[in-house]
Amino acid sequence: MINKNIYGLYMITMSDGFKIKVNASGLQSAYESIIKASIVNAPISAVKSCKLIKQIERTNNMGYFRPNMTYLQIHNVIKQVFTMAYITKPHHMTLNSEFKAMKEEINTRQKSGGRRYPVCLSGYVQGVFDTLYNDVQNNSVEFCYLYKGLLYSTHKRSNRLTTERLHHMQLDQDEWQAMPNGFIWKESNKVFSGF
């Protein structure tokens, strides 16, 4: 069974009670996951759910926002994207593509040529997204170097090895420059950016 809430999120409930919550852009990956599950002898409901997801993908033109939404509801829609990011720990390009889709929707025009949403809403969405994105960068990811298969973090309170160990190895400048580096989600080895 698939239910859509007012924020454009879908709750997929399998016959065995398992629930998947996705937004419109996540329906394809949910579809692929259910296909994989059905290959390994999942219940018939998995295949039925796949058909429903495909049907929703064809008919879904709703997007993220509604013209009569309050600022709080808009904030909550954007916050849901980041809540899912804290769970799934995606690459930063995934968050940027979500934001691009939101901005494109905010800037759409009606058939008559008028704006679908007020101009001030574009700035509001930008501000909320920037605030939540900065929170991810400041609190949820850490800059790391990859040296001989191990991650070394520049964050002082990291659970990983710190770059102080690399400094004690007295590596020359060429080795530092050749070292792959980037931002990694804390408590995970998933790349946020770089590498």
Image: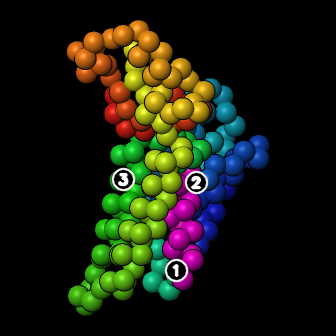
> Residue 98: image x %, image y %?
40, 56
Q: Badge 1 is on which residue?
A: 71
> Residue 189: image x %, image y %?
51, 28
Q: Which residues are magenta?
A: 70-84
What residue do we see at 34% from left, 68% from top?
Answer: 103
Mark 1 touches mark 2? (CB < 8 Å) = no
Q: Earlier in the sequence, mark 2 or mark 3?
A: 2
Residue type at mark 2?
Thr
Residue type at mark 3?
Asn
What residue do we see at 48% from left, 36% from top?
Answer: 142
Q: Badge 3 is on which residue?
A: 96
Question: Callout 1 environment at 10 Å: few (<14), some (14 to 19), or many (20+)?
Answer: few
Q: Determine whether, in the image, residue 174 is placed left or right of residue 35.
A: left
Q: Badge 2 is on which residue?
A: 83
Q: Main secondary structure of the magenta part?
A: helix
What residue do we see at 46% from left, 67% from top?
Answer: 128
> Residue 53: image x %, image y %?
52, 53
Residue 55 seen in the current view = no
Secondary structure under badge 3?
A: helix
The quadrant of the picture occupied by the N terminus is bottom right
The quadrant of the picture occupied by the C terminus is top left
Residue type at mark 1?
Tyr
Secondary structure under badge 1?
A: helix
Q: Earlier in the sequence, mark 1 or mark 2?
A: 1
Residue sitting at the far right: 16
What residue do we see at 35% from left, 27% from top?
Answer: 181
Mark 2 touches mark 3? (CB < 8 Å) = no
Considering only vertical position in the picture, is 189 above or below 132?
above
Q: Determine whether, in the image, residue 107 is placed left or right of residue 137.
A: left
Q: Earlier in the sequence, mark 3 or mark 1?
A: 1
